[in-house]
Image (spheres, rainbow, N blue to C red):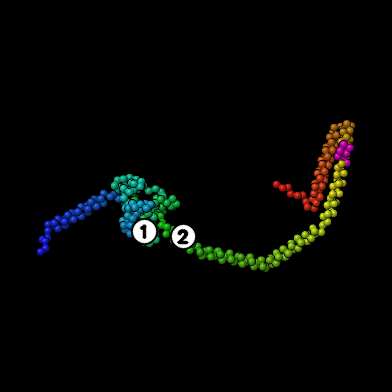
Amino acid sequence: MSAPTNHWKLGAFVAGSVLLGLGAAAVLAAQSMQLVTVGYTSYLDEAVTGLDVGSPVSYRGVKIGHVSAIDVAPDRRHVEVAYTLGVEVLQRLGLAGTSRGEKTQITVPPDLRVQLASSGLGGGKYLQLDFFATAPPPLALPFPVPANTIPATPSTMKNLEDAVVRAVDQLPGMAQDLAGVATRLDVILEDVNRRGLPGRAEATLDGANHLIASLEGKLRQLPVAELSRSAVATMERLDKLLERLDGNDGLLASARRSSDALGDVAGPRLAANIDQTGRDLREAAVAVRQLAEALQRDPDMLLKGRAKVQP
């Protein structure tokens, strides 16, 4: 025979389970009632496909609220997105300006924006609250906005789409510019061919080549040895001339003695002029001697020119 069922133990277990569930529900409700939030609104100038009520609102990856409503703005261009932010989280992040429960006002710096973001390639959409240093100033909307409004900035996909659209719009103008450049090139090439510039340039190059070849032949035919011997002979004659000019019994010394004698007779002015003339003659003699020494070191200098001084 089977043992009799203990009905009172079964009833006590069911009653305890119900009471435990009611207690947990009450605790969760109390915690949710203690969570103070503040509502804010942003207006996005783009499609919000994938963003739903209950989607998270994050600040640099930290969840601070959730989307509470999505609707079309009065201008039928923007999308009005309402969301709630936790006051405790705002205070922890240092964004809460005044803390008076639901009247808490968030501190909105000039570069604080709301942006539509995606959780990966195939993930859902959410709102991102962050600072954008390069964000333009918010545009004035054509309808009144509530006090708790945070400006929005276009999402990354929106910026990419706008860039692609601008590039596509510029393609016809770029094609016209390229066609104009090609037309001008055709005109220039036609004018070059009509004037025969390629043939003339080729003839000029041929003439230059012939001239260079002729100059090389003339240089090979120069009697370099005879010119060197002539330069040496000229140098020797210059040396003898310098010996006659310089020295105690030379022409310069005689001229100085004559100028001294004339100075005694004619006066200091004439003597000074004659003395200056003597100095000029001496400088000329020195220059001639330097030329002779240079020719002696390099007899071919008259043909090759003066050598370049090495740095």
Tell me what residue is drawn at x 56 percent, y 66 percent: 179
- The span shown in magenta is 244-250
Q: Is residue 84 visible?
A: yes
Q: Element type at marker 1?
A: strand
The vertical placement of 195 against 44, above or below, is below
Residue 229 horizontal side relative to residue 126, left or right: right
Pick the residue in front: 167 or 122. Answer: 122
Residue 77 seen anywhere in this rendered image of the structure: no
What amino acid does circle 2 point to? Ala
Q: Quadrant of residue 289?
A: top right
Residue 253 appears at what percent x and percent y? 87, 37
Given the current orientation, which residue lies at the most extreme front position? 1
The circle drawn on residue 163 is 2
Nearer the observer, 217 or 171: 217
Mark 1 vs 2, N-terminal side: 1
How far apart, in angstroms, are the residues tagged by discs 1 and 2?
22 Å
Amino acid tagged 1: Lys
Q: Position of residue 154 (x, y in %)?
A: 41, 56
171 left or right, relative to 156: right
Kindly identify which residue carries mark 1: 125
Q: Does 294 appear above or below 197?
A: above
